Amino acid sequence: MLHVAPTPARKKVRIATTSLSGCFGCHMSFLDIDERLIELVDLVEFDRSPLTDIKHCGPCDVALVEGGVCNAENVQVLRELRANAKVLVALGACAVNGGLPAQRNHLDVGDCLTRVYCDRTGGKVPDDPELPLLLDKVYPINEVVRVDYFVPGCPPSGDAIWKYLTDLIFGRIPRLEHPMLHFD
Amino acid sequence: MNDYDRFVLDGRPVHFERGQSILEAALASGAYIPNLCHHPEFKPHGSCKLCTVKVNGRFGSACTIKAMPGQEVASDTPELNGIRRVLLQMLFVEGNHFCPGCERSGNCNLQALAYDLEMLTPHYQHFFPARELDASHPDVMLDFNRCIMCELCVRASRDFDGKNVFALAGRGTASHVVVNCPSGKLGDTDFALSDKAASVCPVGAILHKRVGFAVPIGERRYDLAPISAQVPTQQAEEA
Ligand code: SF4
Ligand code: SF4
Ligand code: FES
């Protein structure tokens, strides 16, 4: 039997994830790495994430941000992640360019609210102080904070996320090429 | 091949016919130079600048510069590809390009070029402009949110179909393509699905109705191979 000295335990990469104005599709796609999740468990640990239910982010290595910025709470969460993460990654079309929610951007947000809540039902625009205030537009996250890396796709495939993440974890320059790079 | 009918592209000799542009000669030889507003059947437009190359050290558009002996042309260099990526990013933020909901996705030259040049983000602040939609025509739909103002439709309708249905209006950032009739609606023109102009748009601005998303993801043109690897097919189809 070969006696190999046990490799010193690699320090786990601490990852935070969040979905701002996204549909959770990118998170679902993340789970699509399937059995590689088992490999991932040995490499990373999670900070704030829908997977851990930790509400506020502490210092971490990588933040994966799904979704654009559509309301005041999104701004807060995004800034907290930026302040705590060494590397911030825009994950998916909405984080990269606002995505489908940004299709409201050429409309007046007041008009949208009145049309939806008042004109048809005769109600009023919800104004519960618990509700985060909508922004005038849906912003790509790089228009709010500095972003280090972008992974486009709606959603990026599990393979693309795995490739990008493992490139990052192992210190390679992360790269997506045909056919993994796609915007849809 | 002798020295009179060839130039050098990225260190490799390329044969040309008299009168051909650098881009035409390159594509004919199977070498790819990125391009968007070029079409083999129409006069060069030289507007998108994606085909920018360095000819004997000076910047120029490969689609408008005639091929000549003695030219040393640089195209596939980090410097030029970087500049091209910036041009693409500007095109993306200037319009409304939401690929996931676009019928042209997977078959779009703008998108395919962005893939090829590894544009991962549009980077600049988005304009999110308000642009016109026109569904008045029974067979063709216009979505100017995605127009890149290459004027291929203008050229095709004017020079090929003899109808002059489209025109460019406005100046500077207010430039936009319009339909040339009093109502400005495509349905009020003699535009037809069989017009050349109905099938030259390189992006998802002029769309044939009732065929959207017919080809499944994974089998669309640029799912199969990157745009730079499709030079012969591109030539055959466009000719
Ligand atoms: S025209 Fe091309 S780049 Fe624009 S949204 Fe459609 S597929 Fe994307
Ligand atoms: S509609 Fe299409 S073909 Fe016409 S100018 Fe715009 S992008 Fe070019
Ligand atoms: S292809 Fe030459 S400028 Fe557009």
Image: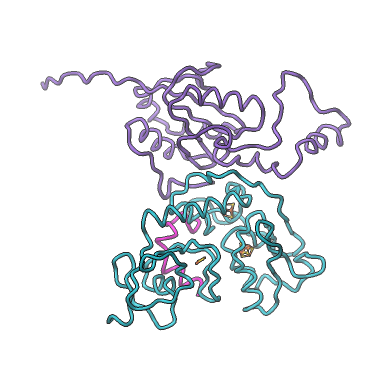
Chain colours: A purple, B cyan
Which of the pair A138/A143 is nearer the observer?
A143
* Magenta stretch holds residue B225: yes
Which of the pair A123/B46 is nearer the observer?
B46
B144 horizontally vs A24: left or right: right
Which of the pair B172/B90 is nearer the observer?
B172
- In percent of width and height, residue A41 lies at 38, 22
B203 horizontally vs A12: left or right: right
Task: Give the answer, above or below, for where A153 lies relative to B85.
Answer: above
Counting labels gives: 0
| Residue with the most extreme left position | A1
- In percent of width and height, residue B118 lies at 44, 49
Question: Splitting the image into 4 quarters, where does residue A9 fall?
Answer: top left
Which of the image's four quarters has the N terminus of chain B? bottom left
The residue at the point 51 percent across, 26 percent down is A82
Task: Give the answer, above or below, for where B18 lies relative to A118.
Answer: below
* Magenta stretch holds residue B86: no
- In percent of width and height, residue A98 lies at 60, 39
Image quarter where ligand 2 lies: bottom right
- In percent of width and height, residue B148 lies at 60, 59
Task: Give the answer, above or below, for where A28 lies relative to B115.
Answer: above
Task: Give the answer, above or below, for where B129 lies relative to A99.
Answer: below
The magenta region covers B220-239
A171 horizontally vs B106: left or right: left
